[in-house]
Image: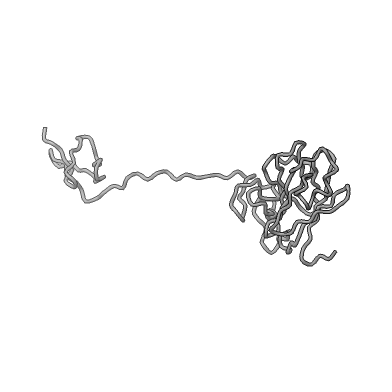
Amino acid sequence: MDRLTCTACDTEVGADEVVCPECWAVLTTDGAVRAGAAETVSPPSQAAVTVTVPADRTACPHCEVTVDAADLVCMGCLRELPPSDRTGAPLPAAALRTTLERPVAAVQLRFKSGGVVEVRAGQEVTLGRAAQHTASAPQLAGFDNISRTHATIGVTSDGAVWLRDEGSANGTWADEVPVPRGQMRPLHDGSVIRLASNVTAEVLLRNGSTRG
């Protein structure tokens, strides 16, 4: 039997092949000879992949971290998330009003036991009994169940407020939700933090127009 080759690339082909496996040229039969036709066949394209995002998941518009549609704050950048309509689509920007649109100058922690700790935008304050924590030690030194270095509260430069547990012995809570060791949790105006079992403080935002 004559050796069959593709005339387009001289690759040997089988008698039952209709497309050259080397150059994808269409093969035609002319007697005992296969010749390459002018038409070529493109390699089969990979099937398109459709990624379906669950209806209850979306992305933070600030940092693109995946968040739950019901979340109010992104756990990636700690910024407030825009509200959604009932279809899950973000509302127009003109309809958004969040605390971040006001110039946050400082945050105050008002302890139920007395005393105030203030944190300014772009700063953080450590909460604990140790004397070096000069901003909080006067309010916490009398509580033996508070760790020497218990937690940290901070305010980002754009006004997002956060709380982090520093490996305390008796735990830290934000609005009665436990704060895992080393992780940040967002705070809002009116939030209540709890250190150990009995030390609580209310979070009050102070923007540039607030006096007193």
Left or right of 160 on screen, residue 191: right
The image quarter containing residue 157 is bottom right
Q: Position of residue 60 (x, y in %)?
A: 62, 52
Q: Is residue 126 above or below residue 121?
A: above
**Residue visible at 73% across and 61% down in the picture:** 97
Task: State the scheme by which the image is colored.
Answer: one colour
Most distant residue in the front direction: 131
Residue nearest the viewer, comparing 193 with 170: 170
**Residue visible at 21% across and 51% down in the picture:** 38
Q: Position of residue 15 (x, y in %)?
A: 19, 35
Residue nearest the viewer, comparing 129 with 187: 129
Residue nearest the viewer, comparing 203 with 61: 203
Q: Position of residue 36 (x, y in %)?
A: 19, 46
**Residue visible at 19% across and 47% down in the picture:** 8
Most distant residue in the top direction: 1
The image quarter containing residue 23 is top left
**Residue visible at 20% across and 38% down in the picture:** 13
The image quarter containing residue 147 is top right
Q: Position of residue 175 (x, y in %)?
A: 79, 45
Left or right of 38 on screen, residue 106: right
Most distant residue in the bottom direction: 209
Q: Is residue 207 above or below residue 88?
A: below
Residue nearest the viewer, comparing 85 with 150: 150
Q: Quadrant of the N terminus?
A: top left
Q: Quadrant of the C terminus?
A: bottom right
